Image (cartoon, rainbow, N blue to C red):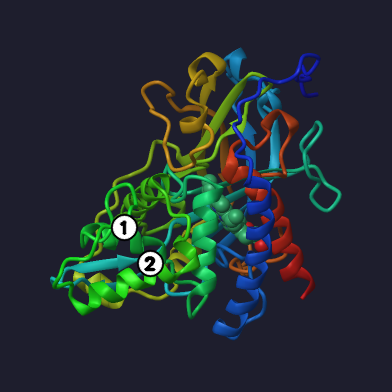
Amino acid sequence: MVTPVDYTTAPTNFENIPEQEGDWRTEITAMMVQLQERRKAVQNSEILRGVHPKSHGCLDAEFSVNTCLDSRFKIGLFAEPGRSFKAKIRYSNADVLKRADLEVDEDESGNKVFKHGSRGMAIKVLDVDGPVYMEDGGAKNQDFLMINTPEFAFRNVRDYRRLTQVLLASADAADPELFFLPLKLLELGVLDPSGNLLPPQPSEPEIVKKLRLLFTSSDLFKDFSADDMRGALSSFAIVQKIQAKAVRDPIDARYFSAAPFRFGPDRVMRVSVEPVGGEQPVPPFSDAELAALDADYLSKALADRMACTEAIKLSFKIQIADAAQLEGKIDDMIENAAMAWDENDHPFTEVAQLTIHPPEQDVELVDRCKPLLFTPWHALNAHEPLGGINRLRKPVYSTSATFRRTT
Ligand code: HEM
């Protein structure tokens, strides 16, 4: 039995919804389907997930709420200490194309530049008790979707809309470079830090003239604001952080929800998963390793782990913020998915563990979760997804899944 959440009084409002956001969500949802269609042609494949199409493996697990749990954590999924649920886990790349797990380039100075997106981990806790926002093929499941940084690379729906437009305008429907054009123009002195166009120097080089023209003539930047410049700077910093993270085995990484979720009527949580005992430091790849690295090295690492019969234990942790801590900080802590919560003010506490039992027989792991839909909206009411990025995910994930399942 789950202790009922007290909704006799209305839950505290923790959101600030921009006026135009509903229109932007509709626009992005339609664009996501167009992107899936375009990428089908680019990759000569079937229709795949709109994001995270490449799986490293799909595993069966047990999700066990800790037996000793402080009473302030006994909410929603965690209401019953010691309760165990069956679960599925899908590890993936966030990259929107099914490309090599890691590609290496050189910058203008000959330094190595790693190219890869975030690594993803999605958990589906099966057959939970209590009202949910969206049923999962008739079942009540609680999903958690995570990436391997505490920040999502885009703050809100407005930033994500420009990214989606940029992707759609690119030749392979997957190139985000134009999103960062304003930063290049800032560096070249064409834009000021507030995104205003500066007058050209008398001897402006041809290449700079071209970039200036690209900015002024493209619809993508027609209402570019000082806040959009802050968004581009924030995204750039997080992309650098993502690319600097070496992952050798998906199981050993630390994952974060980045976006916030209700924790009962009057608190909010963010979640994280890491190996029991903590994330171990991952040494960077040597040149020799890079030269020999398989395009699918992450699924191979996972398969190697599954070939060993030992059970693997992961720690499921939450960070909590209450109404007093959120007072005056909704725009930063709820509406900005690109801002991590300070771990000193909001320490992570383990509330559950995941146990992965390697399959007894040699089974194909990579495509086992192909038909499943993981969405943050497969959620108990006690864990309502909050903030713009989560509001956007409600129509987008279902539409992406319906399109790939029915086309
Ligand atoms: C905090 C932010 C986010 C996180 C942590 C996150 C994480 C993930 C993960 C781990 C998956 C893979 C699920 C699976 O294995 O099936 C996924 C799938 C997906 N994500 Fe996100 N994501 C975020 C934001 C977004 C946003 C803003 C969009 C676009 C509006 C988006 C669009 C998608 C789509 C379309 C899928 C595939 C849905 C399907 O067809 O099953 N995500 N995401």
Q: Bin the neighbour count of mark 2 within 10 Å (Cα to Cα): few under 14, some 14-19, many 20 and up.
A: many
Residue 338 appears in the rendering: yes
Which amino acid type is marked by label 1? Leu
Which amino acid type is marked by label 2? Phe
Q: Is mark 1 within 8 Å of ligand 1?
A: no
State the residue at coordinates (38%, 75%): 294
Q: Position of residue 11 (x, y in %)?
A: 71, 20
Relative to 153, is 107 above or below? below
Q: Nearer the viewer, residue 284 or 212?
A: 212
Quarter-of-image position of residue 118? bottom left
State the residue at coordinates (36%, 55%): 239
Q: Bin the neighbour count of mark 1 within 10 Å (Cα to Cα): few under 14, some 14-19, many 20 and up.
A: some
**In the image, 233: left or right of 35?**
left
**Label 1 close to label 2 by CB (< 8 Å):** yes
Which element type, helix, strand or loop, lies under badge 2? helix
Q: Quick one: label 1 or label 2, which is nearer the N terminus?
A: 1
Q: Nearer the viewer, residue 289 or 244?
A: 244
**In the image, 214: left or right of 95?**
left
Q: Position of residue 25 (x, y in %)?
A: 65, 52
**In the image, 192: left or right of 386?**
left
Relative to 46, is 178 above or below? above
Which element type, helix, strand or loop, lies under badge 1? loop
Q: Position of residue 357 (x, y in %)?
A: 59, 50
Residue named by callout 1: 197
Name the front one of labels 1 and 2: 1
Q: Position of residue 277 (x, y in %)?
A: 40, 36
Q: CA distance from mark 1 to mark 2?
A: 9 Å
Residue named by callout 2: 215
Quarter-of-image position of residue 83? top right
Quadrant containing ligand 1 reads bottom right
Q: Quadrant of the C terminus?
A: bottom right
Q: Nearer the viewer, residue 76 or 51?
A: 51
